[in-house]
Amino acid sequence: MNIEAKDLSKVYGGGENRVTALDRASLSISPGDFISIMGPSGSGKSTLLHLLSGLDRPTSGRLTYDGRDIYSLSDRELSAFRRRRIGFIFQQFRLLPVLTARENIIMPLLLDRKQPDERYLQELAGMLGIRDRLTHLPHELSGGQQQRTAIARALIAGPDVIFADEPTGNLDSKSGGEVMELLKTVGKELGKALVVITHDSRIAAMAARRLTIVDGVLSEVAE
Ligand code: ADP
């Protein structure tokens, strides 16, 4: 899947309260790309991520997935599209506390009334080193194991792209590094594009393509 963002802008408020959160951002994402986006707080990172993943609509600009303008979809079509084609990873893991790791992982499929492919689930759990943790509740898992469970959940529906918002923000630097290495390896083996927002320059440096965002202006860091 090729993702093409062209001149995406997002303006909040009006008059004196007008804020240009994102200013004509353009970006191409190809299968297998690993992209990091770094920027200070308030620079527009979340706004960009929400627009690229169709969680929000821009004030102006275009976003296509394989040539298809996704903002032309209705809200309902867009949420189905997101469930099937896009995986999300959050800083706070966002696992449901009353469900086991396994139940959390397959939740996106159940929401789509699909049965899990047991072999793929086991393959993912194996790659992420959580095969023996699948029957545990989130509070019985370490932070790193919780985030690895969340990575499996992001991948279970076979998305084309994973968007991760500060995925190591709640982890110590050792388990954060391990989680990123795993995410990178799994993304590569499964051919997924990976877009990671981070404050951490060491995490950003792991990406093949690095972008920065300052005051809503996105730019690619030259090699
Ligand atoms: P980051 O994720 O880099 O911290 P954001 O994308 O959250 O930055 O925010 C970018 C700018 O847009 C900030 O100035 C923020 O205050 C503003 N902003 C974000 N969301 C809203 C909103 N819903 N209403 C008004 N302003 C917003």
Image: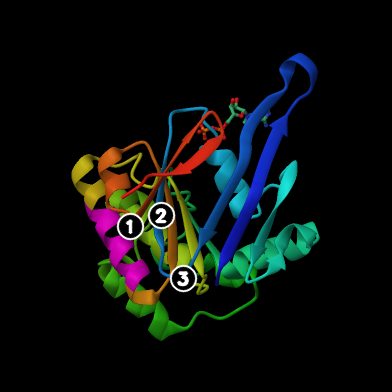
Q: Amino acid at mark 2?
A: Ile
Residue 108: name its quadrant. Answer: bottom right
Residue for badge 2: 35
Q: Which residues are magenta?
A: 178-188
Q: Which sits in the foreground, 40 or 179?
A: 40
Residue 66: name its quadrant. Answer: bottom right
Dot 1 falls on a residue whose secondary structure is loop
**Numbered mark located on residue 208 in the image:** 1
Dot 2 falls on a residue whose secondary structure is strand
- Would you say the residues marked 1 and 3 are in contact, meaning their CB atoms lie under 8 Å apart? no
**Numbered mark located on residue 31 in the image:** 3
Measured in 3D between alpha carbons, the distance from the residue under mark 1 to the one under mark 3, in whole angstroms, is: 13 Å
Q: Is residue 26 left or right of residue 139?
A: right
Neighbor class of circle 1 (other Cα within 10 Å; few <14, some 14-19, many 20+) is few
- Provide the major secondary structure of the magenta segment: helix
Residue 187 at x, y percent in the picture: 37, 67
Measured in 3D between alpha carbons, the distance from the residue under mark 1 to the one under mark 2, in whole angstroms, is: 6 Å
Residue 24: name its quadrant. Answer: top right
Determine the quadrant in which ligand 1 lies: top right
Residue found at the very far top of the displayed protein: 16
Asked if 36 appears above or below 123 in the picture, the reply is above
Q: Amino acid at mark 1?
A: Ala
Q: Is 125 colored magenta in this rendering?
A: no
